[in-house]
Amino acid sequence: MNKTLFDKIWAAHWVGERQDGRQLIYIDRHIVHELHAPHAFADLDKSERTVRRKDITVVVQDHTVPTRMGVPLRSAHIDATGVATAKHGVKRLSVEDPRHGISHVISPEQGWAVPGGTLACPDSHSSTVGALGCLAFGCGTTEMVHVLSTQTIALDKPQQMRICLEGKLGFGVTAKDVALHLIRQVGVDFGRGHAVEYAGGVVRDMDLESRMTLCNMTIEWGGRTCLIAPDERTFAWMAQQAHSPKGDQWDQAVGQWRGLHTDADAFFDTQLTIDCSDIGPQITWGTDPGQTINVDESIAPEEQIHVDHLDRFQRALTYMDLQAGQSLLGVPIHRVFIGSCTNARITDLRHAAGVIQGRKVAPGVKALVVPGSNAVKLQAEREGLDQVFLAAGFEWHQSGCSMCAGANGEVGISGERCVATSNRNFENRQGRGVRTHLASPAMAAAAAIAGHIVDVRAWLPVEGRS
């Protein structure tokens, strides 16, 4: 029987079936962050269990880490995590470690996520590493304790879905725009309970960091996890990583990775093709990522909203202080956040700096850049990107989740309007009463300079137009 890529990785890691019918899947790497680590290790102690594979378990610190320069890199969660990991003998990356960063950014950087492997992390955006063809699962505290003590995760095998993204992306359109457009088209629940495989010409044309952005947003439309089949772009990216195998071992690894693809005529429970040719730069207007428009569109008038969705539509408008039928162009903003596990890699910072170069942040706008890892930060500083941001009036921060999580005191002020490159725009997500618009790094950068929402295509170099 022909198999999907998901089937192949699942079968290679299948351990057995529990009495409750759930399948036990072996986890190659377990990444734990400090927001949940203290609770998980405390539960482990209560049940008198130990960590089964300390050698492939690592604790990172990202959610509660203050990223502002000059602020002590401490929190109650960080302190408690340090005590717990020392007691259990588990590797912990301190915030001063050069490998430090957001878990989903450093997992590929450090070689924890590899094609054909499995990974578990107590965070819903674990699917980011599906961009490499690594099968990752977000898990709750109870599941995390199970992984710590058995190195397996118990799951009902999800249904499978293939999303084919076809066409050619237009000028100024990025993977973030594709992800937001997809959620707008299918809704925030369409992928519920599914393992998603992304395919099609648009995906093949994306570089690896763009694929990570696309995969990162899968949870925002309900997907359980996701994958992209490794290809020549994947192999080229892997070859540049210091942790990758060398010589004969590299040849053997690539030989194995080439088998990581979906067989012809393999069965998917759902298949969908989306033409991305007419997508423009996207921006959210509401309080979930599906409430999105092309930046040159207007919010739909009320008469176009189905009665079942009208209350949600009106609530979102009220919270965001917007009107049905309104254009977002020219709407004033107060804050810009460029960061998060969605868009804080080196290519994201390059895109933003390209818009900002030689310009100044508008008066009254607070703008910050938070690299996704120490490695990204150092690379950006080697390229002089930090100086571009600083000269423009941006704050240049240490790596961490920052405003995306808001668990570190880095939030906006009630009533502020923020353009953010993160993945969620829920009510109060970035501070109580803060109104968040999700967009690409280039869109966010342009808004910071203009002081209001703009169409970034007018800000990009003419020579970049086709």
Image: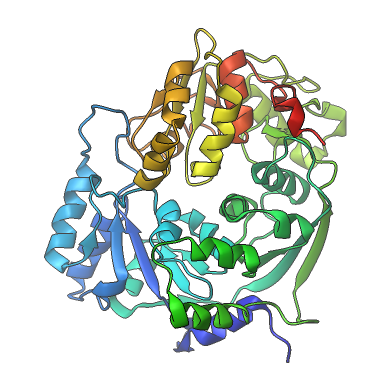
Name the side, left or right, on which 303 lies relative to 76: right
Rendered view: 442 above or below 395: below
- Percent of width and height locating residue 428: 49, 31
Q: What sort of colour scheme is used for the picture?
A: rainbow
Q: Determine the image quadrant of residue 463.
A: top right
Task: Please give the name of the residue rendered at 64% of the width and 19% of the height, measured from the top-left corner.
Answer: 321
Rendered view: 116 above or below 376: below
Camera-nearest residue between 357 and 440: 357
- Percent of width and height locating residue 447: 61, 21
Name the side, left or right, on which 453 lies relative to 11: right
Q: Determine the image quadrant of residue 323.
A: top right
Q: Is residue 447 visible?
A: yes
Rendered view: 366 above or below 3: above
Rendered view: 44 above or below 212: below
Q: Residue furthest top?
A: 363
Q: Quick one: quadrant of the C terminus?
A: top right
- Percent of width and height locating residue 347: 55, 43
Task: Please give the name of the residue rendered at 67% of the width and 49% of the height, measured from the top-left corner.
Answer: 188
- Percent of width and height locating residue 154: 45, 77
Q: Residue furthest front?
A: 247
Camera-nearest residue between 227 and 462: 462
Task: Please give the name of the residue rendered at 49% of the width and 29% of the height, measured from the top-left corner.
Answer: 337
